[in-house]
């Protein structure tokens, strides 16, 4: 028989983080490294015999060999069929859409999102369940436990499948169906948004946009949807060819890493609307001409205007945001009389709320927004939502945001990242903060008084599961706060994230520079966290 049972020994540290297992490519290239993790996933599934698995990745370096390996392991582990994107490509939201459409058993996504790619870059792998969403913590914990005791894995010793051709192939007893990575997803978008209205906006000749795919996965999706189905002129999509090393770039759609787009949007004759997505297509950045929309504001604005979009005409059952995300959406929920849930960072915590229909929209400050249409955040979805709003409202991006602030107040908000700091120093900083809770409680800093400080923990309202240690919060009056967290997606050292927020209801004070509006809080974060002394950094690596 072609079935091989290969003896192996565990690797250290195959612990899924905020979004799956992310490591250097060189780590994944070690013999058995990928195989051990994939077998650890399969060993924690039940009822997958004969079932369908969805498989695809963001096309980064090592995607191709990894896909072939996983196909052969899926066959050896009894799956009946794998749906795989042509050339092994599928964006993260597209995997979610394909799982749901085909009622598949689950899916595997190969991506390290916005982390740089190439032989010296990062790679990643994540398991999604039958609802299309990232596996819950219970499952990722079980996968990690299996990876620590694994002694063998199963793989079919068969030739590679040609993934460049659409259609069905046989791999041992298992079918491999190569699917168009774009069409199911594009159809879903057409179903949610008013494409004829958006098309009319482009046809008017009075509106232009630029979408930066950052040489990552969204290029083919954006070209099909924006340029073909919606009739935007060709060239609307920039850097639309997915490259294995993302063109050497850092496909993180923020003001720092999408600076080409930012420059285009900042010119006086620039386009009316600009957007970008990340490596695996689940993030979005929204820009107007000379205007940046913070992701937290974007979520709030989508929620406030959802009824203008066909897919959400019936209203929202509720909304959710991750804890560090600004409370702008809370204000909208309050006004609408719907529930707003506060979850830990990472999309896996939204899954239960979406499945239970407690929420319709959700989002994170880290350029992630989504809805119940899939179980991942969705970059192009957010862009189309904005396009639909622009087409209906016939206003500029800046006008829409300013009107929103005037109505709901403005949450001045910023995140300061200190990347690749010494892991021990970062842990020490967090521990120091936790040790300070007693002395901080009630303490006054000028006009600010600490109302509460804690390490955020979350009880899932659907299944009652508890997740602790999700970030240190220092809460002041009126929604002013500082949050400290360590990233769970980095692969080198530690990344410290400091989230700063203050609420300003007065419209006459909505035109301040964000960093200036937060200056006192930034100062306080330094004082309380001893950031400079402990990390050796004079300033953040990235400010968003
Ligand atoms: C970051 C973001 C988080 C997001 C996660 C995955 O996690 O802060 O909001 O869900 O990335 O996004 P962390 O642990 O580094 O802060 V993606 O687009 O990288 O899948
Ligand atoms: Co991503």
Image (cartoon, rainbow, N blue to C red):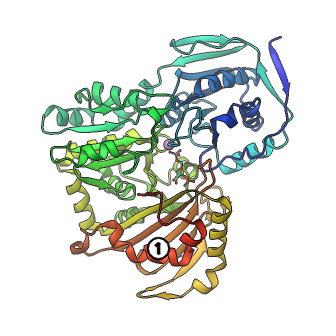
State yes or no: Cβ of the residue under disc 1 lies below 8 Å from any atom of ligand 1: no
Q: Nearer the viewer, residue 65 or 24?
A: 24
Q: Is residue 391 left or right of residue 332?
A: left
Q: Quadrant of residue 74?
A: top right
- Residue 309 shows up from this direction: no
Q: Quadrant of residue 382?
A: top left
**Quarter that holds the C terminus:** bottom left
Going 68% across and 62% down the picture, which residue do you hit? 424
Q: Position of residue 524 (x, y in %)?
A: 47, 78
Q: Position of residue 390 (x, y in %)?
A: 22, 46
Going 44% across and 46% down the picture, which residue do you hit? 371
As displayed, is residue 473 above or below residue 53? Answer: below
**Quarter that holds the N terminus:** top right
Count of residue discs: 1
Q: Which residue is mark 1?
A: 481
Going 76% across and 25% down the picture, which residue do you hit? 77
Q: Nearer the viewer, residue 200 or 516?
A: 516
Q: Is residue 393 left or right of residue 532?
A: left
Q: Position of residue 268 (x, y in %)?
A: 16, 48
As displayed, is residue 130 above or below residue 325? Answer: above
As displayed, is residue 342 above or below residue 154? Answer: below
- Residue 371 shows up from this direction: yes
Q: Position of residue 62 (x, y in %)?
A: 60, 28
**Secondary-structure class at tag 1:** strand
Within 10 Å of the Cα at label 1, are there few (<14), some (14-19), or many (20+) other Cα atoms? Answer: many
């Amino acid at each position: 028989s072609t079935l091989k049972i290969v003896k192996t020994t565990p690797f250290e540290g195959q612990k899924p983080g905020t979004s799956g297992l992310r490591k250097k490519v060189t780590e994944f290239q070690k013999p058995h490294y990928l195989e051990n993790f994939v077998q650890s996933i399969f060993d924690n599934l039940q009822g997958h015999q004969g079932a369908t698995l969805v498989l695809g990745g963001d096309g980064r370096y090592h995607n191709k060999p990894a896909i072939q390996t996983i196909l052969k392991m899926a066959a050896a582990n009894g799956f009946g069929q794998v749906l795989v994107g042509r050339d092994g490509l599928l964006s993260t939201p597209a995997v979610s859409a394909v799982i749901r459409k085909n009622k598949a058993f689950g899916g595997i996504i190969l991506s390290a999102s916005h982390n740089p790619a190439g032989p010296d870059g990062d790679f990643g792998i994540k398991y999604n369940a039958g609802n299309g969403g990232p596996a819950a913590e219970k499952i990722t914990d079980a996968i990690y436990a299996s990876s620590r005791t694994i002694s063998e894995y199963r793989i079919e010793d068969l030739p590679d499948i040609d993934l460049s051709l659409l259609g069905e192939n046989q791999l041992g007893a298992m079918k491999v169906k190569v699917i168009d990575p774009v069409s199911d997803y594009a159809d879903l978008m057409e179903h949610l948004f008013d494409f004829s209205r958006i098309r009319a906006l482009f046809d008017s000749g009075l509106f232009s946009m630029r979408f930066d795919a950052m040489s990552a996965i969204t290029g083919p999706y954006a070209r099909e949807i924006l340029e073909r189905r919606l009739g935007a002129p060709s060239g609307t999509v920039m850097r639309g060819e997915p490259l294995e090393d993302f063109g050497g770039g850092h496909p993180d759609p923020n003001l720092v890493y999408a600076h080409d787009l930012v420059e285009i949007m900042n010119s006086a004759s620039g386009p009316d609307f600009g957007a970008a997505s990340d490596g695996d297509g689940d993030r979005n950045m929204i820009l107007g001409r000379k205007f940046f929309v913070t992701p937290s504001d974007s979520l709030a604005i989508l929620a406030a205007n959802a009824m203008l979009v066909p897919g959400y005409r019936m209203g929202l059952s509720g909304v959710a945001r991750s804890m560090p995300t600004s409370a702008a959406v809370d204000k909208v929920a309050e006004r609408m009389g719907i529930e707003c849930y506060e979850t830990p960072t990472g999309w896996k915590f939204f899954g239960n709320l979406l499945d239970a229909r407690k929420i319709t929209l959700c989002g994170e400050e880290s350029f992630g927004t989504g809805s119940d249409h899939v179980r991942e955040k969705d970059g192009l979805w957010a862009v189309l939502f904005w396009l639909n709003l622009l087409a209906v409202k016939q206003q500029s991006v800046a006008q829409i945001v300013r009107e929103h602030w005037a109505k709901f107040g403005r949450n001045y908000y910023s995140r300061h990242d200190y990347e690749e700091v010494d892991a021990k120093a970062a842990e020490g900083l967090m521990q120091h903060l936790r040790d300070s809770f007693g002395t901080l409680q009630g303490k006054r800093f000028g006009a600010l008084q600490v109302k509460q400080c804690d390490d955020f923990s979350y009880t899932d309202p659907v299944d009652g599961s508890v997740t602790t240690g999700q970030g240190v919060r220092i809460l002041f009056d009126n929604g002013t706060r500082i949050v400290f967290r360590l990233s769970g997606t980095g692969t080198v050292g530690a990344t410290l994230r400091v989230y700063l927020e203050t609420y300003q209801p007065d419209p006459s004070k909505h035109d301040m520079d964000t960093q200036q509006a937060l200056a006192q809080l930034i100062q306080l974060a330094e004082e309380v966290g001893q950031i400079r002394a402990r990390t050796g950094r004079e300033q953040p690596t990235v400010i968003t």
